[in-house]
Amino acid sequence: MDGENHAHEADYGPFRRPLFADPQARALSRVGVVDVGSNSVRLVIFDGAARSPAYFFNEKVMCGLGEGIAQTGRLNPSGRSRALSAIRRFVRVADGMGAGELTAVATAAVREAEDGPEFRDLVEAETSLKLFVIDGEEEARLSAQGVLLGWPGSYGLVCDIGGASMELAEISGGEVGKCVSSALGPQQLKGIKGGKKARKAIIRNTLSDLHARLGPQHNRLFLVGGSWRAIARIDMARQGYALPVLHEYRMSRKAVTATAKFISGTDPEELRNLCGVSTSRMKLVPIASEVLKEVVREFRPHDIAISSYGIREGMLYEQMPQPLRDRDPLIEACHFSEAKDARLPGFGRRLYEFILPLFKSAPPARLRLIKAACLLHDVNWRAHPDYRAETCFDLATQANLGGLRHSERVFLGLALLHRYSNSRESARFSGIIELLPEKDRRIAETVGKAMRFGAMLWLGQDTQIGALRLYPKRRELELTLSPDTAPLFGEVAEARFNSLAAAFPATPKVILKT
């Protein structure tokens, strides 16, 4: 019987238990993961929507376990002590938060160090936490699956950099293809004799070999890992980018080259202060930028995207049944938020159906954003009325939402802003709003006005709200009200309906059914 239990545990990987026993489940029970990397040790506790897990708790300690490993072959002694202390804390924190049994994985430093097994045993002896040490190809595969959690159906090359290694994995049509691992981590490279010139030769030779093994990779390059994110922060600062959200931030090949040059020519302390990068991370950034510059030169991707999702999210995606994977992470997150925070959960869907006739010609990608806006239209009702519009805008543009390009975040933010306000005259919005073309800004404003009006017609679940119909040729916006809805069409509702009509522009017409 014990052998049977062990077999079942093996089926669920490091978690040793099913996380998604019910494929129809909308919510994820609290799940904690400890990631023991070459640079940092991190605890993430996931919660929220099953298809779009949110960070209930997220803490890291920059331990530098892999520092000096290229020279000594052993884990950094100070890093070992700091990592063990961090893991002790994480076990206690997770227990206090009701996360249940933690899952812990270790990557390049622990797997390559001669004292890695000794450290793994020490962790288990002192914390009862079993440390799963994964190989390079598995690390690449899990990172790629983390990208797929945030970008369903995406394609391209995933590049995950740690302190002691760098992994590459193909993704296409929602599947992970070839996976390779290399020693191109900054901690491995910084001790090489011969300085920058010698490093460049090693990086180029290694990447040439990886390219030969993977074949042409000219699609999107997804970047996973703290050093890549630090470089992206520097790129944002260099270009004065208005929306400081790393996930889905895009860079061109030209921008990578310019930023690598900027990094090499700027004092690290100045960069650290400019971008809020930690001192320990900043030590690795110059060498990481050399690697990225050569990755881009070798593979020549058509564009480059930063992913905040990696190994930890990939471990969750690994267990998701296909019906759950097939759900839209954005819509699932919005459903979860509505169910948890809205005054009338379920009204978002009815609101979407009510305003949908106004946007019949919109492409599916736009309708998806309109649906998300309707689901989120009331989740910030607790905010003070004077700041509710700003709170909604911040939620959409800065929240942990997967499956959203930055321009889509701005569209969603504007729609929700105009759900509560007719005006967006605020200096703090201007730079961010400019990431969206003017035509799309007007559409987002119209969506917001439609929700602003529709929210006046709250009724019970089984009561017909009424119907909206737009006649573009004769420029007429028609509202049909049922007898149940007519009493709700007071002065404020009428003013909001007229404001909606003016946004098209169209002449408002009201029909009262008897």
Image: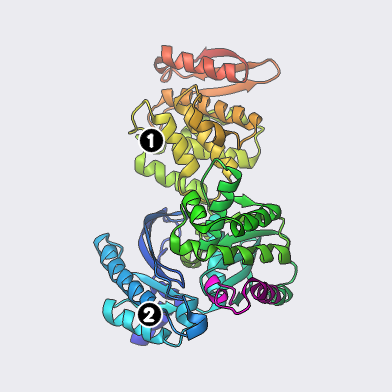
Q: Is residue 242 left or right of residue 279?
A: right
The vertical placement of 487 against 437, above or below, is above
Q: Nearer the viewer, residue 242 or 324?
A: 242
Label tally: 2
Q: Specify whether residue 184 is painted magenta.
A: yes
The main secondary structure of the magenta stretch is: helix
Can the viewer see residue 349? Answer: no
Please tell me which residue is depicted at 44% across the width and 44% down the height of the picture: 335
Which sits earlier in the primary sequence, circle 2 or circle 1? 2
- The amino acid type, in three-letter code, at marker 1 is Asn
SS for tag 2?
A: helix
The numbered disc on residue 380 is 1
Q: Rounded to the nearest whole Å, what is the CA distance between mark 2 and mark 1?
A: 48 Å
In the image, residue 59 sits, relative to residue 107, either above or below, namely above
Q: Amino acid at mark 2?
A: Pro
Q: Position of residue 148 (x, y in %)?
A: 56, 60
* Mark 2 lies on residue: 77
Q: Nearer the viewer, residue 126 or 448?
A: 126
- Looking at the image, which residue is at 41% across and 61% down? 22
The x, y position of residue 202, in whole percent, is 66, 77
Horizontal side of 362 relative to 378 (left or right) equals right
Per the image, label 1 sits on a secondary structure element best described as loop
Mark 2 or 1: the one toward you: 2
Please say whether residue 497 is visible from this viewpoint.
Answer: yes
Indicate whether residue 298 is drawn in magenta. no
Q: Position of residue 1 (x, y in %)?
A: 34, 86
What's the magenta region?
Answer: 183-207
Q: Which color mode does the image show?
A: rainbow
Dot label at residue 90: none
